[in-house]
Structure formats: C-alpha cells, structure tokens
Amino acid sequence: MKIGKDSAVLVVGAGIMGAGIAQVAAQAGHAVWLHDARDGAAAQACDKLGATLQGLVAKGKLAADAAAATIARVRPVAALTEAAGAAIAVEAIVEDLQAKRALFAELETLLGADAVLATNTSSISVTAIANGMQRPGRLVGMHFFNPVPLMKLVEVVSGLRTDGEVAQAVFDLAAAWGKTPVHAKSTPGFVVNRIARPFYAESLQLLLERAVEPSVLDACLRGAGFRMGPCELIDLIGHDTNFAVSRSVYEANFQDKRYMPSLLQAEMVAGGLLGRKSGQGFYRYGDGGGVPALPAFEPASAPYAQRVVLHGAGPVADRLTLALAGQAFERDTASGWTGLEVDGAQLRLTDGRCASAIGAEVAVFDLPIHPSLGGRERGTPLAFALSDRASGAWVQAAAQWLRAAGFHAQRIADAPGLIVARTLAMLVNEACDAVHQGVCSEAGADAAMKLGVNYPAGPFEWLARWDAARIAQLLDALAATYRGERYRVSPALRRRSWA
Ligand code: NAD
C-alpha cells in the first residue's frame, strides 16, 4: 500500500493543527481538501496559509511560484461529500472521543474502501476511536507536533486493530512530507508525552519540597544541554495545558503513582498562575520580568589541603583534575565512588543517596553530562548538596573545590539524586519501560525525544554514556528515600543493570 503524491488528502478540522497539516501536505505536492464544521473556518485558514506563505516569500525563504502552487493545491470544502475521492483523511478536530468516532463513521461511508483514516489525537486511544468502525484496520494515529510545518516528528500510532500495512503507508507518507516518523503503540501519552513526564515531575517534586529555586533548577538543566529548563518551559506551554497532559497520563494509567501529577501545579492552575499567558507562573512576566539569570560565575582556585585523593575513573573524575592543578594528589580507582577526598571529607558524584545518609563531612554533586564536558568549558551550573552534619569549613570548601573544577556550583537542599541525575535517570527509566512494553523502539524513543521536545540527546544515548547499573542504583536510592511507586525501576533497566 502506498499513498502517492498524486493522491488527494482530506484534512478535517482547520484549527492550529489542521491548517499546519494542510500546509505540509500541499507543500509536498498533494491536492488538499480542508474541511471544518464551523462555517467559513476552512476558507479563513486558507487565507491565513496564503499570508504565511507570502511572508516566507518576502523573507526569501520560499520561491514565489512554489508559494502560489502550494496555495492553489488547498481547497476549502463546505461538505465532506466534496472530498469523497481522498486517499487519506487526517482528522484534527476537537479532542473528544465521541466527536472523533462520529466523524470516522461518516468518513467510512463517504470515502473509498481503500482510503486510510488518520487521527491526530494527542491523548485518546486509537484503539478506542476505531471501536465501532466497519473496518478498524484502516484507522491509524498520525500525531504531529505544534507548529506542524516546523516540527519534524510524527508519531505513527497503531491501535490494537490497526493494519500493519496502513501504519507503514502513513509512516512512508510522513517521511515523504519531510518528517521523521516514529512507530508507536497506542498507550497513554504515546512516546513523547509519556517519556517526557519526569522532566516536569522531578522538578515539580523538588519545588514542592522547597529544595531549590526555579531559576537554579532551570539553569542546572540548561547546563545539561536542555534548551529550556522545566520551569520556563512549563510557563511557556501553560500550566493548565501541562497539568492536563499529566493528569490524562496519570488517569489513563489507572492512577499509577509513578505518574502522579503535582500538588504544587494543581494549586498554581487553581490560582490562575498559568505562565506567560497569564503574566505569572514560576516567574513574573511583563515589565522587567522573565527568567532571572544566575549571578556571574567566579572562578576559584582550590583551597589548601594536606591530603587529596581522587576517587574513580572516567570523564567526571578526569574533569575534577582541573581543580588539582599544582596540587599533589593520590588516586583510588577501586573505592566504588567518584569524587575527591579532601583531608578525610568527601565531595562525591551523587549515587542517589542524600549527603546526610552517607556521613557528616560529605558533599554530593550532580551529574555533569553536558556534551561540552569533554571540552572542559567553565561556568556550567551544577547543583551540589551538603550533609546536615557538615562543618562550616567543609560547606565553604566543597563549593570552592567545585568552582576550581570549573563548575558554577549551586547549593541546593540535601535532596536525593539532586537535579540532573534524578531527572535523566527517570527519563531513561521511562524510556526503558516504553520499549519493554513495545510502545516504540530504542531508536524511535531517541528520535522522538530529540525531535518532539528538542532534548539534547535521546534517553538511550544518555544510557550509553552513563551506565545502567548506576542509573538503577540511583533510582533504588530514591525509592528508599521516598518509599513510593514513583521510582520503581523498569524491569528492562534492571535487566540491563545486571549485564
Ligand atoms: P483547534 O481548536 O485549534 O482546532 C480544531 C478545529 O476543529 C476547530 O476549527 C473546530 O471548529 C473544528 N471542529 C471541531 N469539531 C469538528 C467536527 N466534528 N468536524 C469538523 N471540524 C470540527 O484544535 P487543535 O489544537 O488544532 O487540535 C486538533 C487536534 O489535534 C486535537 O485532537 C488535539 O488533541 C490534537 N493535537 C493538538 C496539538 C496542539 O499543540 N494544539 C498537538 C498535537 C495534537
């Protein structure tokens, strides 16, 4: 089965997503029929598309004849009967199961027996939408991301009864439209909205515990390569939208505590602190508002010490040698931890335990994983925490050692797994579970997270750079502290940790 360029495409729903899908299909050379239940909405969307394409021409990003040809291919249709010849219908109407079922029931009677029916739903089960159809095998999810013309990812979502050939035809079609498709199984959140949950949830948990300020949290995750930190990102998305997705994934998983939404966010939504659109979320917007920058990084040299031991091996241990220039030190690669021992006090890479659980003169620091780590860039924000029993002298010295190693050290409360380590561990864990349950492949998960939410690396790329055993150990330590379901290790990650 193949949906060629000469096949006509019907797009139903001329809102944000439908208009974008129509544009992409027309730019790929298809004749496109655009329909909306609201009178005049499809024609308006065509006018807007014309203006968008003209804007691209004016900026020199699109040839005038290509723009004219694209807009000429899109035709608003007042009645679905006018589009009976379409080879594929892509639905982007209201997110409501009954409305979608009713539409597909109508399309089944209007379109040819071979026509493919695709839904752009972001949260409804494709299996549920197909239930009641005469030929449920031809319904498939074609989940685009907003804004459609710019976002490369398309999740091709198969329900229980989706025909494999239909899914493959839509996969190939998305690729022909210049997108990167990823196969997914119809499960709550599909790939991106499921694997991404911990990116928000771990930060919301740290904020609920008052472990860290939003601006520090954001800076540390940007320091790990994310384009935006979770707080600024949620403020941009809107707390109401982000909370609705979190709730829907939680409810769809029969209230599995692993996906439990945040009380803090519930309160913000209830109070109308929705982010940029309401003028206040984690940050205030408007005059002089926005995301506060951290104070400038001030380099430091290492404090005086009589005996220093560098523990562990690998990129983090190597990086710490920056702090040891001109200082005599011993090495211990057999102790089982990475960090510095300074006159008996410890500065350790987090293993998921609180510093206070390890000892008195103990500081733990977050996972430095930025791609530029090898480049020894200085000034990357990095969280660290101190044992509740640490002396004042070690509190000062631990920060100074991290600064001497080139990190913009940010002290936070003694929260297990700090910021980056616990967030990445949970993202990897969720991705392992998704693959374990056949939702997507490892390559699919990596592509989806890099293209759907702009992650600097895919979860399986992090897993390869980090280590399954260490990630499982970190999550076990979090589970031991919190004693809940949230940090349970995926059976797939557990198995890898034994390898
Ligand atoms: P939207 O509100 O901008 O547009 C929906 C359009 O559908 C409206 O113009 C409405 O008049 C029309 N409509 C409603 N019921 C209809 C019907 N029965 N027949 C024909 N037209 C009908 O919504 P949107 O943001 O474009 O979302 C559309 C779909 O795409 C939803 O299923 C949504 O979950 C999904 N989606 C949205 C996003 C996003 O970021 N907005 C991303 C991915 C998927």
Image: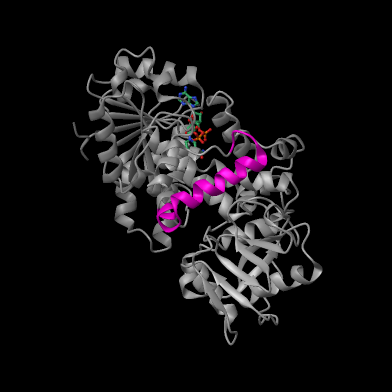
Residue 165 image position (x, y, % from top left): 22, 29
Q: Position of residue 443 (x, y in %)?
A: 34, 47
Q: State the residue in front, 429 or 50.
A: 429
Q: Quadrant for residue 1, please give it.
A: top left
Q: Position of residue 180 (x, y in %)?
A: 33, 47
Vertical relation: 81 (above or below) 197: above
Work out whether residue 227 or residue 340 is closer to the camera in this orientation and state it. Answer: 340
Q: Which residue, as the protein is rendered here, is positioned at the far left?
A: 1
**The image quarter in which residue 218 lies:** bottom right
Note whether 474 is above or below 348 in the view shown: above
Tell whether 297 sits left or right of 54. Answer: right
> How far across and down, in percent of the image, does residue 99 sit?
48, 19
* Above or below, 387 relative to 248: below
Residue 307 in magenta stretch: no
* Residue 242 falls in image quadrant: top right
Residue furthest to the right: 392
Q: Main secondary structure of the magenta part?
A: helix
Determine if residue 281 is in view: no
> Residue drawn 34% across and 52% down?
67
**What residue sits 48% from the left and 40% below the top?**
430
Q: Which residues are magenta?
A: 461-486
Of residues 456 and 376, the one drawn nearer to the viewer in this rendering? 376
Residue 193 located left or right of residue 22: right
Determine the residue positioned at 29% across, 21% down. Answer: 137
Q: Is residue 467 magenta?
A: yes
| Viewer-side residue, 4 vs 448 | 448
Residue 444 visible in the current orientation: yes
| Residue at point 77%, 57% (across, down) | 388
Up-down relation of residue 400 to residue 336 (above or below): below
